[in-house]
Image (cartoon, coloured by chain):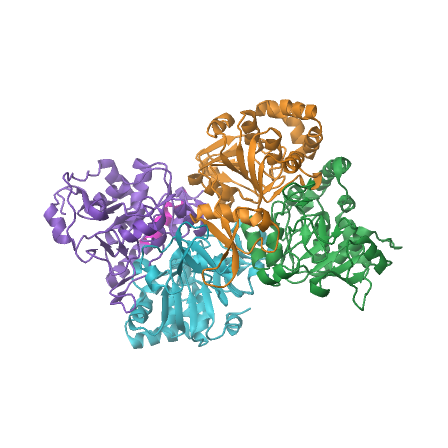
Chain colours: A cyan, B orange, C green, D purple
Amino acid sequence: MTLDDVVSEIRNGDTIAIGGSSLSRKPMALVRALARAGRKDLRLVVDVGGPEVDLLLGTGSVAAVRYAFVGFEVMGLAPHFRRARQKGGVDFEEWTEYTIMAGLDATIKRVPFLPTHTGLATDVLNVNRSFKRFNDPFGGEELVAIPAIRPDVALIHVNYADVQGNGVILGDGHVDVLCAKAAKNTYMSCERIISPEELQRYGRDVQVLRVHTAGVVEVPWGAHPTGCAPEYRADLRHMQDYLISCGKVEDWQAYQDRFIYSDHARYLENQGGVEDLVARLKV
Amino acid sequence: MTLDDVVSEIRNGDTIAIGGSSLSRKPMALVRALARAGRKDLRLVVDVGGPEVDLLLGTGSVAAVRYAFVGFEVMGLAPHFRRARQKGGVDFEEWTEYTIMAGLDATIKRVPFLPTHTGLATDVLNVNRSFKRFNDPFGGEELVAIPAIRPDVALIHVNYADVQGNGVILGDGHVDVLCAKAAKNTYMSCERIISPEELQRYGRDVQVLRVHTAGVVEVPWGAHPTGCAPEYRADLRHMQDYLISCGKVEDWQAYQDRFIYSDHARYLENQGGVEDLVARLKV
Amino acid sequence: MPLETPYSVDEFLITTMARQFSGEVLVSSVTAFGALSARLAKMRYAPDIAVLSTPESGMEVLPMPTLTLGQFLTDAQSGIPLSMEEIFDAIFTDHFRIWINPSQIDQFGNTNITCIGDWHQPKVALVGSRGIPEDTSHLSEIFYYILRHDPRSVVEHVDFRSGAGNGEERDHDLGRHGAPTLLVSDLGVFDFTGPGGRMSIRSLHPGVTVEEVQEKSGFEVYVPEDVPITPEPTEDDILIIRSADPLEVRKWESLSGPEAAERFVQVYERERQLLHATWPQLKR
Amino acid sequence: MPLETPYSVDEFLITTMARQFSGEVLVSSVTAFGALSARLAKMRYAPDIAVLSTPESGMEVLPMPTLTLGQFLTDAQSGIPLSMEEIFDAIFTDHFRIWINPSQIDQFGNTNITCIGDWHQPKVALVGSRGIPEDTSHLSEIFYYILRHDPRSVVEHVDFRSGAGNGEERDHDLGRHGAPTLLVSDLGVFDFTGPGGRMSIRSLHPGVTVEEVQEKSGFEVYVPEDVPITPEPTEDDILIIRSADPLEVRKWESLSGPEAAERFVQVYERERQLLHATWPQLKR
């Protein structure tokens, strides 16, 4: 598949779970392709979100976001997220790290909810309209029911994959495996496609199984500007440029033209090219 | 620790979760040490049980068993289990593979239960007194609540461990990790103790984390007569002798004297010694 | 049966089982028949299946007939290591298939591996429901096989429902998730499309009559208008099975008791020798 | 403060934080202060802790101060790879500790990283509760730190409870699981043993007065009879911190805004060069 093939499988209004965490291993090339294709009214589900959510909010592609976190870590707050939260117009719902995982896991286990104490005595329970307090059927404790999250699509980026859709993740899998299992259709970009024989050598680092994936795209630097350990680090310089561009309408327009409304090859060129990325970001 | 040190931490009446599955990687040396020490009224929790449950039933050590399965696979039924089930006197409760996992996971997640559809329209739901039907708090489906299983002790056998209690399992972890996390105290035997540095090389095969273990014992052949891949296969010859010995009281007495009421070193000698085991069972 | 053909009944059954697989699913190979049907399917009928080894849960392996003791053989192939959690997630998300060999199956496709007689005081305690309740509440295809179709195994009502068949309770509690799909026996292929979800003949093996089925079943099996003959194995099917199982492990799956165990001990040792001989070609 | 001593306030705070760890627990090193306190604790005060790297979740690593961007440094150490599921299981089973740096903390130890103002129409949308609700409903020790104790961060009531403090709701819903244990600020160490679970002074840093605390807090902090002085770092503590953080990443954690980001970009590049230099000695 190509990035555009994946995007053609995604419709306006779809619920999309996005893998990675924070500034790590976000499927940014897929995310940019989605924005570039003009998909609208997307309903995002992220655990520890960041650049991917902010970019899609900035391009006006988003109708709703379920999230535990959206930010740029030490680099600061997420500008489009912050603006949209303060201005209104997008349906935000605050969850937490485990409850996003539990909501996905409920779908995987084919149950309507999973129980937890998480959220009790916090205001998350007051602003989250999906959670529900209930009594343990054995008559004891009061608990929180986390409803199943049922994504239409999951987008993840991994280190290596075979053409059949088995994926190798060399670092923390974050919520990628949960996203892949819970979504109706999971699309996976990867740094490199390898043979099934080579893939098997990665043992338990083969974290994504092909029965859970609908398509694979080879996209080197597909997580950029987030990092993809151990291939390359997050590109703080690019993120800094991104954050600055969000300050003024014309700067944001220029950023979009240069980095979003251009295909992945041109995206890399517009960074200064792969050689520069290698020099700055490769371990 | 030694096998006897572990046993000294276990009391009559304790609830004991035992790892491994079927004829694979059961902590048999620990199980024999438990029987040898005369521990009574043990309340066992096993997923796919076999030789370990049958042996402890045969030595009269057991008050209760929660199980999804107890048998010797192609070798046939478990003789002491079968007798005890038919005769009564031990508190058996039939669960299923996932519900044992869910019961342990409920304890780990510190919730009183986990929901599932498993068991509906089967007689497991009619004979299992612990499961409870209830209605999904979101008002939809009828579900089964699987109550938390709270073992006092977990016993598992792994390939390698460091002295701190991190454990390497080279094959399927079966329910070992769930047992280790759910139990108040987890004791782990291993084929070989290795250094923390060597252990780290096993990457994601380090399946048991030291924060979940209370003690480690080095016991080569500690899973025998079950297998411990890839170190050695299950010893069908020994199991065949075991099964035959269960036929007559005096034969069972002889088996116990030879293989249970003797320490692990003598146990191995009484097999014909380690060299014979290597010749017959090593890959 | 008996079939007047150059292939044996086990080869016929394994081929019939292999032909039921389709799509991209994990396939458990927990018995010799399960392993051989998965292997044949992978090679000829359903190339996208991902076969599991047992009991060490490697995925994408070449299944070998090993009487459920595959750990030793599996070591020679690395596979993709899975966990119990992965396997149950594949069951819950309907990406898993398994041929289950029950002790009893009844007219509604309820199945029993737990006990003969009342559970609380069984005449014979068998093994316990294992993962069958999970399969029969979540999978869209549930495959059963029995090697000897007789009124002791094909019964009017199972003594204990380890696996959920058709009926009101299923309709109310589960819907079609996990409903019985097929039974393959030495007499024919049966589905559960008869009145009220009862067992119905899908096809009879060559030479088998409807009368024989009724005689050997503990209830009256529904007979549809059209009763075709089960297609025979091809030359290729038979060659694949034979070359995959040179020790003829498949012949012994129906045995039980102490002599059977003794034979397993023997084949187990031969299996080990065979593996040692083939190790170099399998080892990566 | 200020302290008339040869060590800096960050070294003082990191040492104080390090001294709170005990036992065999996973320790998250998600911020520079978190990483350095974990490293110091591991070396001097709590040798049994198992330190995690971030964001790639290696366990048993030597934590490095990396402004939450440790993936690059972590690659040099293999560690034991964990998953999110492992980490949350460690939280639920109370085998996890973390120093959390909230935007606001109030008199009952409620903490906020979500928003300033009303959630539905925030004056400032911050980041979202992340995993703090999990921590504050399950762990037996909850550690907070803030680098600048002032009435904007130490408030009477938080605008949003991302983390559960003390009070009726906790008593009813959670009991003591996840109750706030300590706050370390640049003024002192505080616990929540005051009336009704309110913030109380456990110790004041050298030179800090009760009056200063009251002035810089958004409410009246409870003052127990005995107010000791927080013990100072030792020579060894300071040397360990300095050698672990030659780029002085710890100095910048309190910065924010575009200039801060620019500095992070710079230190990030120097960090990479440093790693390249030390790689051979770390690589296994």
Magenta residues, start to end? D269-280
In the picture, measured across the screen, residue C150 lies left or right of residue B90, that is right
Residue D278 magenta-drawn? yes
Image position, residue A210 (x, y; %): 57, 59
Image position, residue A90 (x, y; %): 36, 72
Foreground: D81 or C276? D81
Q: Residue at x 68, y 25 (%)?
A: B249
In the picture, measured across the screen, residue D120 lies left or right of residue D71, that is left
Residue C83 magenta-drawn? no
The residue furthest right is C4
Foreground: D88 or D27? D88
What quarter of the picture does the C terminus of chain D occupy? Answer: top left
In the picture, measured across the screen, residue D27 lies left or right of residue C31, that is left
Q: Is residue C168 visible?
A: yes
In the picture, measured across the screen, residue A51 lies left or right of residue C235, that is left
Foreground: C101 or D284? C101
